[in-house]
Amino acid sequence: MNYVNILLPDVKWNTKSVGLFLSLLVLPNLLGMINLSTGFGFNVHFFQIAIFIAAFIYGPKGGLLSGLFGSAYSAMAMGNPYIVVGNCILGLVTGLFAKKFNAMAVGLAFMVQLPWLVATDYYLIHMPLPVITLLVISLALSNLIWALVASKMTGHIKGMLA
């Protein structure tokens, strides 16, 4: 039987790459339970690093899938199903821009995700604007930190997968 990789055609699948990919689908749920308070009214979130690594290594589809599966816990815990779509946007767009812009791809992806986040949180979840403002600051800061970390880690991880 001739196997054709239609989901992620640029990925050379082996035990390591399958294990990493599956981990990056689940890991954002675990990391989503961790928030570090800054003392300034907003938190640093950790879930994004797995989505960014998935996007940098597995491309747009990998980032999208990590955002999709990795947001299940947060969406249920907060009663906000729109988080899943927002994180799918973040992973997909990061993957689309990753080859050309590396860590800056995350900033571009966040700008694409931001209207969705604000609209759904304000109009559908009915969050007050001051809460949304702090959330946007938290996510922007967290995205910046984890984009830089993920971009530095990606080359090493790719080397380990070879």
Image (spheres, rainbow, N blue to C red):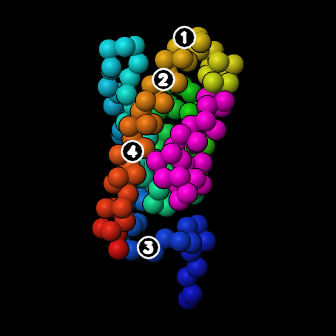
Callout 2–callout 1 Cβ contact below 8 Å: no
Span highlighted in magenta in the image:
93-117
Callout 2–callout 4 Cβ contact below 8 Å: no
User: Label 2, label 1: how many angstroms apart (C-alpha)?
Assistant: 11 Å
Q: Which mark is residue 130?
A: 1
Q: Residue 159 magenta-drawn?
A: no
Percent of width and height locating residue 75: 52, 32
- The residue wearing badge 2 is 137
Q: At 42% across and 44% down in the image, what residue appears?
A: 147
Residue 42 located left or right of residue 131: left
Between tags 4 and 3, which lies in front?
A: 4
Asked whether the viewer can see residue 147, the reply is yes
User: Between residues 131 and 85, which one lies in front from this camera angle?
Assistant: 131
Badge 3: few (under 14), some or many (20 or more) residues near its Cα, within 10 Å? some
Query: Dividing the image into 4 quarters, which one contains the C terminus?
Result: bottom left
Question: Upstream in the sequence, badge 2 or badge 4?
Answer: 2
Between tags 3 and 2, which lies in front?
A: 2
Q: At 56% across and 37% down in the image, what residue appears?
A: 110
User: Label 1, label 4: how many angstroms apart (C-alpha)?
Assistant: 28 Å
- The residue wearing badge 3 is 13
- The residue wearing badge 4 is 148
Percent of width and height locating residue 63: 52, 52
Q: List the single residue furthest toward the bottom.
A: 1
Callout 1–callout 3 Cβ contact below 8 Å: no
User: Label 1, label 3: how many angstroms apart (C-alpha)?
Assistant: 45 Å
